[in-house]
Image (cartoon, rainbow, N blue to C red):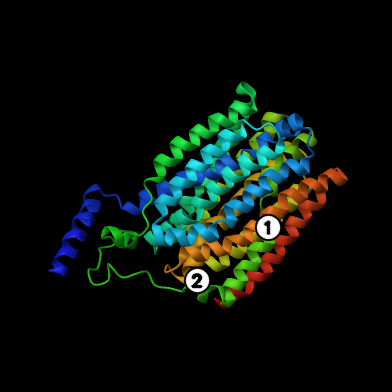
Amino acid sequence: MSNRNTSHTQLPAHFAAQRTGLFRGWLVVAGAFTVTFVGFGSAYTFSAFLESLQKDFGASRGSVSLVFSLAGFLYFGLGVLSGPLADRWGARRLAVAGMVLVGLGLALAGQARSLTQVYLAYGLGVGLGVGASYVPVLGAVQRWFVRRRGFASGLAVSGIGVGTLAMPPLAAYLITTLGWRHAYLALGIVAMVLGVGMALLIANDPRDHGLAPDGDAPQPSIAADAPTGFTLREAVRSRRFAGLYAACLVCSFGLFVPFVHLVPYALDHGVRAPSAVLLLGAIGVGSAAGRFFLGGLADRMGRAPAMVLMVVGMALSQLVWAASSGFWGLAVFAFFYGAFYGGFVALLPALVMDFFGGRSIGAILGVLYTSVAFGTLVGPAAAGFAFDASGSYLWPILFGAGANGVAAGILWPMARRGQ
């Protein structure tokens, strides 16, 4: 009787997917795409607001940059909590809560009367919101795919690239027409409505719906089995995890510096404000392309070797930035940096799934992303304070390139030996 009931609940869901011709996993990808679009797109508008915040509050570039660094620390560091919670409660609840927090944080930032209040509103709202949603939705996508995991993961996180393309120019337009305070309120409403609506598409595991990964026919004998793989304790004790953690920590010191400081850098070198903001869009175009195309390429060439390629590409791109002062040179840097950065972000969760399986994917990703949290806390703010002290971004840019070179050296043995 139990077996007949199990089959009865599984087959209609599978047949429904066949009738529509759409595997439900792609709806999960669409939800994850929008969550990353809203969350990171909202976060990466910060560069468009930096000059207004600096002027209104009479603050240094380093102290204003710290707003982004605190938010970044929270949205990557919180994964250590949101990942295990998603494994237990399901990713959808965390994603919806995260989008609500992002919307509230942006709206409250627009009401701030001091830079400290911006730290609290933007830092806690956007930081906690993205942190609550990012790791859970990525973990959910990994469970829905096996053969096309790199492509699906890349498509899901390409929302970050598209958000980086679309949101900063939108923010710049809103600042010009409404002022920075009302611009934050408008962005908060967009985040709340669009983010929460699409987060409802997230589903934690195909087995919960009588389906198998990649849209394959479900196998009744194993459909209800739990995902296999490492426990969190087993994973963090492994050499693979230690290598990944070290590489992510090192490269993340410079990873997000362009998202905060590229626009001020361009303005300092005489690029007009509308064109300077477009440079963030160029990062977004490159990022979307990198996540989409390089994720699929990595499925064929191997994800570990592809990860080495991504960090080397970021290092070389940063050298182009160090040598550029005009719009077109900076645009070339922005596009290629975006592409390799996008590939890096797309490959990381898929590589973790390859190495450690799906049993505790949310928890493992959450712990791994604490490495990025620490680097993000230090990098953008340190670059701002370095500029305040020297009047130049040269050393922060070169430090970022060198950090990526070190990260490539850490990852190379893992790729070469298949560790």
Percent of width and height locating residue 47: 67, 38
Marks 2 and 1, the one that precedes in the sequence: 2
In 3D space, how far apart are the residues under numbered discs 2 and 1 (Cα atoms)? 22 Å
Asked if 251 appears above or below 321 in the picture, the reply is below
Residue 89 in view, yes or no: yes
Residue 393 in view, yes or no: no
Q: On the picture, is 29 further left or further right than 3?
A: right
User: Callout 2: helix, strand or loop?
Assistant: helix
For the residue pair 190 and 340, the one nearer the viewer reads as: 190
Given the image, on which type of amino acid does mark 1 rest? Gly
User: Callout 1: helix, strand or loop?
Assistant: helix
Given the image, on which type of amino acid does mark 2 rest? Leu
Q: Which image quadrant for residue 85?
A: bottom left
Q: Within 10 Å of the Cα at label 2, are there few (<14), some (14-19), or many (20+) other Cα atoms?
A: some
Picture residue at 45% right of the left edge, 49% below the top: 95
Q: Which residue is mark 1?
A: 375
Asked if 354 appears above or below 54 in the picture, the reply is below
Q: Which image quadrant for residue 391?
A: top right
Q: On the picture, is 47 further left or further right than 22?
A: right
For the residue pair 410 and 94, the one nearer the viewer reads as: 94
Percent of width and height locating residue 371: 63, 62
Q: Quadrant of the C terminus?
A: bottom right
For the residue pair 299 and 63, the one nearer the viewer reads as: 63
How many numbered marks have been drawn onto this rendered protein structure? 2
Percent of width and height locating residue 162: 53, 42
Picture residue at 41% right of the left edge, 61% below the top: 88
Q: Quadrant of the N terminus?
A: bottom left
In contact (CB < 8 Å): disc 2 and disc 1: no
Q: Which residue is mark 2?
A: 232
Q: On the picture, is 56 further left or further right than 391?
A: left
Asked if 419 appears above or below 61 in the picture, the reply is below
